[in-house]
Image: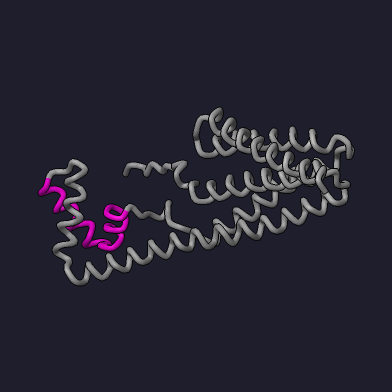
Amino acid sequence: MPRMHIETHLVERIGWLRAAVLGANDGIISTASLILGVAAAAAGKSDIMLAGVAGLVAGAMSMAAGEYVSVSSQSDTEQADLEKERRELVEDPKFEKEELAQTYVARGVDVELAREVAQQLMAKDALGAHARDELGMSEITAARPIQAALTSAATFSVGAAAPLVLVLLSPSELSIPIVAAGSLLFLAVLGFLGAKTGGAAVLRPIVRITFWGALAMAVTASIGAIVGTVV
């Protein structure tokens, strides 16, 4: 009896990886930008830390809520499509079988073979066959609101903690350059890890994430400096 060849695919990580990268990226950029903006307004270290901690807590809660709501909307749409398909399978199974067969024909399968495949698959799991091959749904890509919310909140908190640690460890007069440089380094590492975990080339993600991070921090620091001068 031949042994089963078990494969794992990188696409299986797409659900939690997207939420993790988004959360950590948001945590580093938003907290570092907030810290730089407050520091540029000539605030003391205690004020900077207070603003950073508040940004961490508020951001983590916002990320969790946002991810849960958005992914829940995706899940609701998937369930609505499945319910519609379930109803159509009861009302007109012949049409649904032909519709599934034509899906295979469009992919290059002979008409008669496509109809036979559709019949056999529907005999085993009609709804599953239509969900997978007509609607493009699968267990790998299914929406998981709680997983997305928890992953985003946790990784946001980790990312946001990094600039705060830099503030604690740096002299007050060097807070701005140290937080800026350190946060860009953290973003580069995040881009590298995200690319390696997803099996992609590393250079483009690193450049992309550090560019937008540097832009956000520069704009926020400039606004903080202007406001600090005016006030």
Q: Nearer the viewer, residue 22 or 123?
A: 22
Q: Quadrant of the N terminus?
A: top left
Image-quadrant location for residue 137: bottom left
Vertical relation: 41 (above or below) 82: above
> Along the line of sight, which residue is nearer the eye, 204 or 144?
204
- Determine the residue positioned at 77% across, 54% down: 53
Residue in view at x 38 percent, y 41 percent: 5
Q: Quadrant of residue 76?
A: bottom left
Taking 25 as reference, is 205 above or below it? above
| Residue lying furthest left | 112
Residue 14 percent across, percent down from the top left: 48, 47
Horizontal side, residue 168 vs residue 117: left or right: right
Find out whether residue 134 is within the magenta segment. Answer: yes
* Residue 203 forms part of the magenta stretch: no
Residue at 60%, 33% (x, y): give it: 192
Q: Residue furthest front?
A: 230
Viewer-nearest residue: 11 or 154: 154
Residue 185 picture location, percent across and down: 70, 33
Residue 62 % position (x, y)? 63, 59
Q: Which residues are magenta?
A: 111-135
The front one of 195 and 59 is 59
